C-alpha cells in the first residue's frame, strides 16, 4: 500500500478534532481546536484550513504526501457538491461550500459525510465492527443517530438513510422533535432516558432515590438514572428496563431487515456499558427473527471520541490510486 | 452489450417457471412445468436440467449462447456453495447440491438466491423499481417476505437479510410461526388478514356481512375481506385499516433506516391495489421521518408472476464478461 497519509476531521459544536492517519487507519498525530461559531459560523472553514496547513508545517509535510481529507459534520449534506446546510449548533443557516473552500485552501482532495455516519464508519473499520462488511451503528447521545453500513459502504438512500433515532417504537408515544410520536430518540437518547424517568415517576409510589430527586426538582441526567439503577434503585431499574426494551425492539427490527454481523451501540448513554448491553440484548433476542438472534451480535462501541476522526479519514480512501 | 442470453428459473411448490431473456431483461421465451415433489423432491433438479436442455433443442440454441442461469428457490440457501436445505414445500429435507448438478447437466454457469429476494430484484430491475439503486420489496403472500436492495445489490447480511415479515409491529401480539409474537407476517399476510378479521369480529357487534360469514363458519380469504371493505362493510374496513396500520408502521421504519427510492408492495394481498396502497401510505406518512415521507415512494408491484424469472435471470448477469 501507499505510504501516503489520510487526514480526518470531526467537526462538532464545541471542538474540531483532527488526525493524521495511515491508510490502515492508525492515528499518527492528533490535535483539536475550539469551534468558533460566531458570525454565523463563518470562521469555521477558514479555521479548519489554517489548522491543517499549520500542522503540516509543524510536521514538515506537504499536501502531496496525503491521499486526501475526510470530514464528518452536523447538518444536511450534499455529498456530491460537498456542501452543508442547516447545521444549527454551528450557526450555519445558509449553504456552506465546504469542499470547494477546503480543497482550494489545502491543495488536497476532500470528502464529507454526516457525523453519525462517519462515527459508524470509524467503529466498523477500526472499532467494535472489526472490519466486518455489514455493521449498523447506533449512537445514543443528546439525540439518537446512526449509520448503516452494507457491504463496507454507508447506506444513504435518498439522503436520510440511517435515521435510526426515528424508528417508531411506540406509535402514539412521546412527542419527538421531528414532529412524530414514539420515535426511539424520545426514549433512548440522554434526554429521552430522563423523559422516561419523569413519566414513570408520576405513577411510582415506592421507595426510590430517583423518585425523591425528581420530586425535589434536582437536575437529573441519563448517567444518574443508570448509576442509581446499578445501585438497585427500584424506579431507576424500571426506567432502564423500559429504555432497553425500546432499544432491543428497534435493534431487533434492524436485525430482521439487514442481519448485520454487528450492531454497535455508542454515544454517551452507552457509557453504562455491559449493564446496558445485557438488558438490550435480552429484548433483542426476544424480538429478532430466530436466525438473526443467533447470528447478529450486539456490541458496545470501542473507539469513543476517536470514532469520528477515524471514520472521517476513511472517506478519503476513495481518492487512493 | 453482448447478444448472449440469460435463463431465469423460478422454482415454486406447484410450478417451475422458466424464461429466456436478453441481458437487458426482455423476456424472449417462457414456459413452465409442474413441480414433482415426490420422492423427497429428488426429481426437481433433474426435471429442471431436462426442461432447459429440451427447450434449447427446440429453439436450436447452445449453452455457449448464454451468459448463465439464475434461479430463485424457497429454503435456506448457501449462495457460495449453491446448495439449498429445508425447503419443505419441495420436500427437500437434506442439502441439495443444486449448482453443481445444474452446471454439470446444462454446461452453463449457475447462481441462486431465495424466491423473495429474486422477486425483489425483478421488480427493482424491470418493474415498479424503475432500475433505482435503492429499492425495498415486500411481498404479502401466504407469508410476508421481502428483499432489500441497496446500491443495486441484495442485502443478505449473515444470510437472513430481508426477513421483512418478521419486523415486530406489535410486541406481545399474535403468535408467529417463527416463534415470536407480533411479527408483521401475522397481520399482513393473506392468512394474517384473516386472523385479524377473526380477532376483530369477536368484539364487533354491528351490522357486517364479514361478521356474518365468520359466524356462519364460511371460508374467508384475504380477498374476501378486501372486497367487502371496498363495499363499505364496516368490520372489513376496520380490518383493512388495522392491516394497513401495521404495514405503514413497518414500511416507515424501513424508510427511516434506508430511505430507499421506492418501497414496492407485491404478493397476493397487493391485488387489492390502490385501495390498499393509499391506506398504507397514510400510515407510512404518519410514522416515517419527515424527509423520508417526502422522498421515499410506496408503489404496487408491476410484474406479477414474472418478477421471479426476471429477477432470477439477473443473478446470472454476474457471469457476463
Image (cartoon, coloured by chain):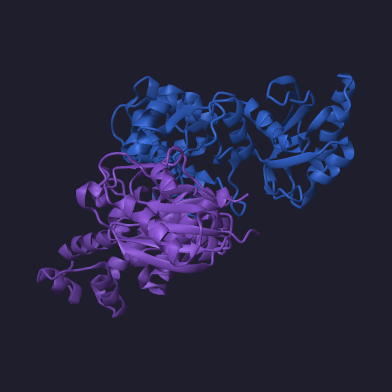
Chain colours: A blue, B purple
Image position of B6 (left or right of A320): left
Q: Is residue B5 above or below residue A7?
A: below
Q: Is residue B82 above or below residue A180?
A: above
Q: Is residue A280 above or below residue A112?
A: above
Image position of A240 (left or right of A261): left
Of B318 and A271, nearer the camera is: B318
**Quarter of the image containing the N terminus of chain A?**
top right
Residue occupying image coordinates x 37% and y 67%: B270
Residue occupying image coordinates x 45% and y 61%: B56
Q: Position of residue A256 (x, y in %)?
A: 40, 44
Of B288 and A104, nearer the camera is: A104
Q: Position of residue A212 (x, y in %)?
A: 38, 29
Res A26 → quadrant: top right
Residue occupying image coordinates x 32% and y 27%: A234
**Quarter of the image containing the C terminus of chain A?**
top right
Res A293 → quadrant: top left
Amino acid at each position: 500500500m501507499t505510504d501516503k497519509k489520510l487526514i480526518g476531521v470531526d467537526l462538532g459544536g464545541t471542538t474540531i478534532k483532527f488526525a493524521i492517519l495511515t491508510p490502515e487507519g492508525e492515528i499518527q498525530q492528533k490535535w483539536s481546536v475550539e469551534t468558533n461559531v460566531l458570525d454565523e459560523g463563518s470562521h469555521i472553514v477558514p479555521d479548519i484550513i489554517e489548522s491543517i496547513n499549520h500542522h503540516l508545517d509543524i510536521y514538515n509535510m506537504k499536501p502531496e504526501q496525503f491521499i486526501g481529507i475526510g470530514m464528518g459534520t452536523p447538518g444536511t449534506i450534499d455529498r456530491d457538491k460537498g456542501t452543508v446546510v442547516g447545521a444549527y449548533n454551528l450557526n450555519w443557516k445558509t449553504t456552506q461550500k465546504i469542499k470547494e473552500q477546503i480543497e482550494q485552501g489545502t491543495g488536497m482532495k476532500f470528502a464529507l459525510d454526516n457525523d453519525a455516519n462517519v462515527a459508524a464508519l470509524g467503529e466498523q473499520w477500526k472499532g467494535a465492527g472489526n472490519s466486518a462488511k455489514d455493521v449498523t451503528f447506533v449512537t445514543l447521545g443528546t439525540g439518537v443517530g446512526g449509520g448503516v453500513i452494507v457491504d463496507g459502504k454507508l447506506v444513504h438512500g435518498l439522503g436520510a438513510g440511517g435515521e435510526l433515532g426515528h424508528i417508531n417504537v411506540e406509535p402514539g408515544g412521546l412527542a419527538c422533535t421531528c414532529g412524530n410520536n414514539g420515535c426511539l430518540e424520545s426514549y433512548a437518547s440522554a434526554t429521552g432516558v430522563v423523559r422516561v424517568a419523569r413519566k414513570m415517576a408520576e405513577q411510582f409510589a415506592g421507595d426510590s432515590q430517583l423518585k425523591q430527586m425528581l420530586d425535589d426538582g434536582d437536575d437529573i441526567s441519563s448517567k444518574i438514572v443508570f448509576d442509581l439503577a446499578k445501585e438497585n434503585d427500584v424506579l431507576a431499574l424500571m426506567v432502564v428496563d423500559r429504555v432497553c426494551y425500546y432499544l432491543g425492539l428497534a435493534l431487533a427490527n434492524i436485525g430482521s431487515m439487514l442481519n448485520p454481523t454487528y450492531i454497535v451501540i455508542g454515544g454517551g448513554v452507552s457509557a453504562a456499558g455491559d449493564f446496558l448491553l445485557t438488558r438490550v440484548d435480552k429484548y433483542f433476542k426476544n424480538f429478532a427473527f430466530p436466525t438473526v438472534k443467533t447470528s447478529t451480535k450486539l456490541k458496545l462501541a470501542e473507539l469513543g471520541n476517536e470514532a469520528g476522526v477515524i471514520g472521517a479519514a476513511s472517506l478519503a480512501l476513495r481518492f487512493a490510486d
